[in-house]
Image (spheres, rainbow, N blue to C red):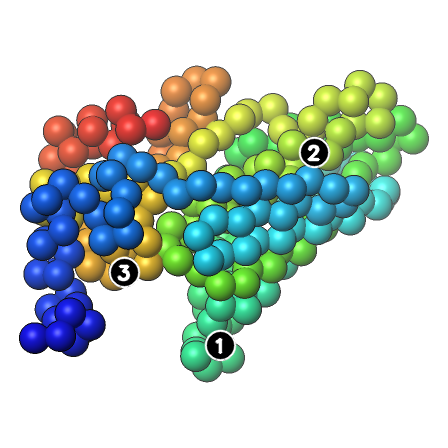
Amino acid sequence: MDADIFREMFPQDYMKRFLEKNVRIDGRQFKQARQIVIEFGEGFTNYQYADCFISVKHIIREIELKEVDLNQCIKLSINMDNQEDLSNLDKARIEKHYLNQIQDIVIQIVDPQRLRTQNDKVSQIELFIRVAGADGSLLSHLINCVSFSLQQIKQFDSKMSIIYKEIKCSTFGVFEDKILVDPSDFEEKNSSIITVISFLDDEQFIFKKYDGKSLNYNQIQQIIQSF
């Protein structure tokens, strides 16, 4: 049978043929993440891995607020150029899902008091996120890219980043007893997926799992040790 037909008809068996030889389909080792290229500029962060390109542009303005409310001060929008085959409704649902996940992390890593300006006003930050292409592990790469972008925003007086907690986020595929770091799109579709967010200062881990399948203790320890 032709390899492409076999891959399409029996994707998990196709994956197993490679994993039994201790190598992944794209030639990576199990714990090997793909190379990331990051470019910083005035008001933007560009982030690229595999065939995916993420761009985050930020605009900062001062607003009048008596109390700093992160939900008012940090505004996010996202445009997924990699969802052209979906209806507008499905595309909007996926974009909302990613925005909610990113917003949840932003609220935990930004120090509200660092948004206060010398003029006793508050900095309002708008992040415009654009995704072109995709090849799996998108949530973790989005979170890392937004985190890097926020780290570039400094207070006017102290020149400190508005972030007071550093994080690291990775996605893992669990296929039988194998743990795959930074799974590709094909690996994501054919294994259990878990995204792990690590707060580096206090060693706190947040696990986001979406398929309802349980992980055993050994698998959790393997994932934590892969950080």
Q: Residue tagged by mark 1? A: 84
Closer to the camera in the image, 30 or 74 = 30
**Residue 186 — which label?**
3
Mark pair 2, 3: CA separation: 33 Å
Is residue 212 shown left or right of residue 33?
Answer: left
- Name of the residue lying farthest toward the right: 119
Q: Is residue 221 visible?
A: yes
Q: Residue at x 84, y 45 (%)?
A: 61
The structure residue drawn at horizontal position 49% and vertical position 56%, both measured from the top left corner, is 52
Reading the image, the residue beneath label 2 is: 152
Q: What quarter of the picture does the N terminus occupy?
A: bottom left
Which residue is pictured at 42% across the width and 37% down the height?
A: 169
> Residue 86, image x and y in percent?
43, 78
**Which part of the image, by quadrant, shows the C terminus?**
top left
In the picture shown, does residue 165 fall above or below 125? above
**Residue 173 appears anywhere in the view:** no
User: At label 3, which amino acid type do we have?
Assistant: Phe
Comparing 16 with 54, the one in front is: 16
| Label drawn at residue 162 | none
Q: Position of residue 84 (x, y in %)?
A: 49, 77
31 on left or right of 118: left
Mark 1 residue type? Glu
Percent position of residue 83, x then y: 47, 71
Q: Which quadrant of the figure has residue 128?
A: bottom right
Q: Secondary structure at mark 1?
A: loop
Which residue type carries mark 2?
A: Gln
Q: Contact (CB < 8 A) between labels 1 and 3? A: no
CA–CA distance between discs 1 and 3? Answer: 18 Å
Tag 2–tag 3 contact (CB < 8 Å):
no
